[in-house]
């Protein structure tokens, strides 16, 4: 008899109220062993609040959170198994990077030599000078020391809140490499980000959160296949109205707002039908660009829905 493996991390109906304000609303998530899971959303979406609830630093107003199948996330043995990088790291500024890493490392009951070896490699890869006091570190260097602290004991689960913010492009590449290596060694990652590009390169699955609500969860492969475009046309009033109507019945097109002489739409699918439609009108201007990540998600789910509707109706 084969049973489905227990998810490494499972959130069911998790909400957080701050007074009358709902920061996180009824979030369900399930993270499998060995995956790199992206938690994507704009600033203020509720990512850090969700992560703080996962770590039991903030109590949910409703819902349950299981880590390694257990709701008790305060045990020492559980802390051994996770590595955490917070979005706003508060660390003792009076220590050098090296002293700080000694301090963090002292609580882990792992093979000391092995941890030190890995730590040394991480420090080298990230080009971090650990002899300097943390108070003298730039934002990027604080982020690096936090990454080393989260990774060095080779935890089973890595929880990272916007890990690459503050890292320059070269270091972002190093970060991606280190995370890929970590996963290849059997690790699981839950990381928040507001960069679709980063998530697309690194993650297997991604959840998109907006205003505390989960918009959806998707496989990155599937998301990459939906080549959504944002189309902005400028034309006279009569032309624009007619075009808006025709576009609304074009497969793959979603008509957005009209403002003045501009009409915005998103489009997914082969480009030819769109070009054919647009060529029938006297346009004053035309822009076709990559959409914002939120638009990709909205279109992805709308397309998904309409396809289901076609099948069922
Ligand atoms: N302790 C708090 N008290 C009141 N509001 C909070 C608190 N923490 C976060 N918020 C609010 O909850 C929302 C989500 O915040 P946060 O989880 O930090 O978003 P993100 O990490 O996605 O940028 C924001 O509107 C933020 O102002
Ligand atoms: Mg945050």
Image (cartoon, helix red, strand yellow):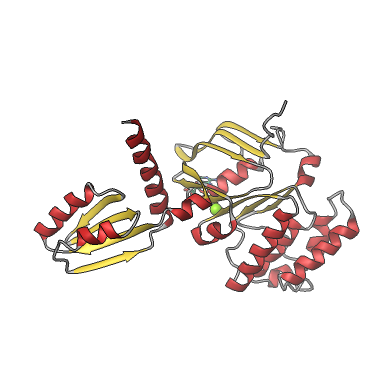
Residue pushed farthest left?
A: 238
- Relative depth, front residue between 297 and 64: 297
Residue shown at 81%/67% (left/top)?
A: 120
**Residue 153 visible somewhere in the drawing:** yes
The percent coordinates of residue 40 (x first, y second) are 51, 51
Which quarter of the figure is the C terminus placed in?
top left
Residue shown at 75%/74% (left/top)?
A: 129
Q: Is residue 217 left or right of residue 104?
A: left
Residue pushed farthest top?
A: 1
Residue shown at 38%/53% (left/top)?
A: 295
Q: Give the image quarter of residue 5.
A: top right
Which quarter of the figure is the N terminus placed in?
top right
**Residue 57 visible somewhere in the drawing:** no
The percent coordinates of residue 153 (x first, y second) are 80, 54
The percent coordinates of residue 73 (x first, y second) are 71, 37
Quick check: 108 above or below 22? below
Residue shown at 82%/58% (left/top)?
A: 103
Q: Is residue 251 left or right of residue 167?
A: left
The percent coordinates of residue 183 (x first, y second) are 70, 54
Quick check: 94 above or below 47? below
Please state the total of marks drawn on the protein image: 0
Q: Give the image quarter of residue 117.
A: bottom right
């Amino acid at each position: 008899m084969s049973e489905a493996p227990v998810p490494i991390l499972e959130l069911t109906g998790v909400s957080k109220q701050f007074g009358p304000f709902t920061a996180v609303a009824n979030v369900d998530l399930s993270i499998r062993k060995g995956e790199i899971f992206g938690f994507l959303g704009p600033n203020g979406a509720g990512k850090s609040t969700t992560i703080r609830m996962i770590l039991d630093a903030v109590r949910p107003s409703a819902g349950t959170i299981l880590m390694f199948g257990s709701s008790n996330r305060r045990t020492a043995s559980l802390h051994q198994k996770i590595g955490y990088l917070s979005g706003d790291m508060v660390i003792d500024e009076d220590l050098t990077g090296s002293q700080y890493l000694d301090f963090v490392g002292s609580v882990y009951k792992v093979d000391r030599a092995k941890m030190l070896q890995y730590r040394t490699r991480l420090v080298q890869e990230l080009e971090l000078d650990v002899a300097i006091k943390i108070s003298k570190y730039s934002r990027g260097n604080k982020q690096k020391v936090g990454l080393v602290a989260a990774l060095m004991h080779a935890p089973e689960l890595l929880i990272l809140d916007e890990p690459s913010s503050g890292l320059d492009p070269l270091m972002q590449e190093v970060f991606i490499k280190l995370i890929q290596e970590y996963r290849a060694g059997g690790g699981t990652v839950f990381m928040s980000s507001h960069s679709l590009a980063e998530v697309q390169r690194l993650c297997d699955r991604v959840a998109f959160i907006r205003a505390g609500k989960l918009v959806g969860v998707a496989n990155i492969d599937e998301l990459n296949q939906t080549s959504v475009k944002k189309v902005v046309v400028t034309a006279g009033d009569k032309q624009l109205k007619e075009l808006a109507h025709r576009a609304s019945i074009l497969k793959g097109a979603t008509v957005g707002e009209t403002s003045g002489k501009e009409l915005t739409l998103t489009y997914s699918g082969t480009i030819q039908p769109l070009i054919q439609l647009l060529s029938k009108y006297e346009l004053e201007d035309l822009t076709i660009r990559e959409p914002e990540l939120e638009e990709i998600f909205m279109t992805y789910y709308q397309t998904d829905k309409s396809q289901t509707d076609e099948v069922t109706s």
